[in-house]
Image (cartoon, rainbow, N blue to C red):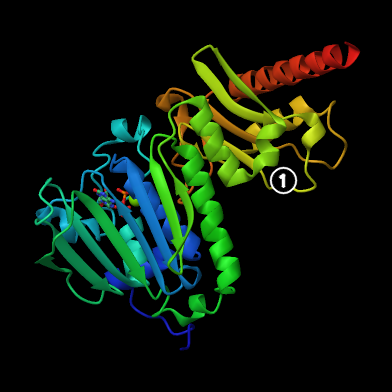
Amino acid sequence: QDTSVRRRIQVLDPRLANQIAAGEVVERPASVVKELVENAIDAGGSRIDIEVEVGGARLIRVRDDGCGIAEDDLPLSLSRHATSKIASLEELEGVASLGFRGEALASVSSVSRLELVSNVEDDPRGGWRVVAEGRNMEPRVTPAPHPRGTSVTVRDLFFNTPARRKFLRTEKTEFGHVEETFRRQALSRFDIGWTLRHNSKTLHQLPVAESVEERERRLRSLLGKDFLGNALNLDIAAGGLRLWGWVGLPTHSRAQADQQYFFVNGRVVRDRLVAHAIRQAYRDVLFHGRHPVFVLYLEVDPTVVDVNVHPTKHEVRFRDGRMVHDFLFSSLHRALGEARAGGERDAGQ
Ligand code: ADP
Ligand code: MG
């Protein structure tokens, strides 16, 4: 069409608006897994089962045993800007749930064939199903049995947006991204039991991990034996901040920054300030160009961190960045220094 001709302004059709919004959060099957699993975590259950076929391009299913969605709320759950997680700006400022934008299901359902079955009761004969295909119709709610909790199935991602479908890589690559998403999310919550299946094969089965031993077993199965054999466990609290987890010894660096997991209040975060503090702490002990490994958890009061920076919420903003930076640096610097001193003592014996 000729853009030089002035056209009247019109409000976008909701389906198109959702498809545009989907561009921000739904890049590939792994992003769908991330969003569905975040919802499953927010639902507060104790187990999450994930199933994908053909790298997630054909099917993604996430099942939880959380709070479920009431029949009346089902159609609304697929609407844009509809959320049960916040109701005011005050609640946004202290938000503890992973979701709050009310966009994921609307976005995903606009670019796939989505089916959601849910039950809020303990009776497994109860439950309701809602189906949406590219959101071209009003979602219909019909009875369907389901134990307490929710199953969301996403088929044929990008079936109606061929330009995006073309960007999907091979099954192996897409599944690699799904598995990495799974790894992060399973590391984010030890109090949840997880399974991951690909093309009907169970690849990960992780029971709830309470004790340090059980947690380390989970780390071993997700990151390999090498990681734990060369990491030290730390837990440091000061000034309302707590940092715990595992950091690799300087003797166990990697050529790539591919085993670095940092969580802020259970949310996977990539942050320049955090990255800088960690780099500084390792500066004197690591060869140039090598990367440390770590799985670290920072716990802060939710009101001192802003998570509403980016739609994927991978970024955060700390109210007092300097303080967080210094706390991270000094905690890690000390832990690594003690490890080195300990190592030298042992070597001298
Ligand atoms: P958000 O997570 O930002 O609220 P979503 O589009 O991801 O937005 O989900 C919309 C709403 O649907 C949620 O606020 C929640 O009430 C409900 N919901 C989605 N998935 C689940 C689930 N697995 N269990 C319970 N409720 C869910
Ligand atoms: Mg969500």
For residue 15, side relative to residue 239 (left or right): left
Q: What is the residue that sits farthest to the bottom in this orientation?
A: 1
Looking at the rendered structure, the kind of residue marked 1 is Ala
Q: How many marks?
A: 1
Nearest to the observer: residue 102 or residue 245: 245
Q: Quadrant of residue 291?
A: top right
Residue matched to label 1: 257
Residue at the (52%, 45%) spot, across then down: 184
- Residue 239 drawn at (x, y percent): 53, 11
Residue at the (13%, 45%) spot, across then down: 122
- Residue 132 drawn at (x, y percent): 25, 71
For residue 198, side relative to residue 126 (left or right): right
Nearest to the observer: residue 32 or residue 25: 32
Residue at the (64%, 44%) spot, across then down: 224
Tell me if the residue at label 1 has its CB under 8 Å from ligand 2. Answer: no
Q: What is the residue that sits farthest to the right in this orientation?
A: 348
For residue 328, side relative to residue 23 (left or right): right
Q: Quadrant of residue 167?
A: bottom right
Height in image: 8 above or below 179?
below
> Could you tell me if residue 12 is visible in this image?
no
- Residue 46 drawn at (x, y percent): 32, 40
Q: Residues within 10 Å of mark 1 (few under 14, many from 20)?
A: some
> Could you tell me if residue 133 is visible in this image?
yes
Q: Quadrant of the C terminus?
A: top right
Height in image: 118 above or below 322?
below
Q: Secondary structure at mark 1?
A: loop
Nearest to the observer: residue 237 or residue 190: 190
Residue at the (30%, 60%) spot, across then down: 152
- Residue 160 drawn at (x, y percent): 39, 80
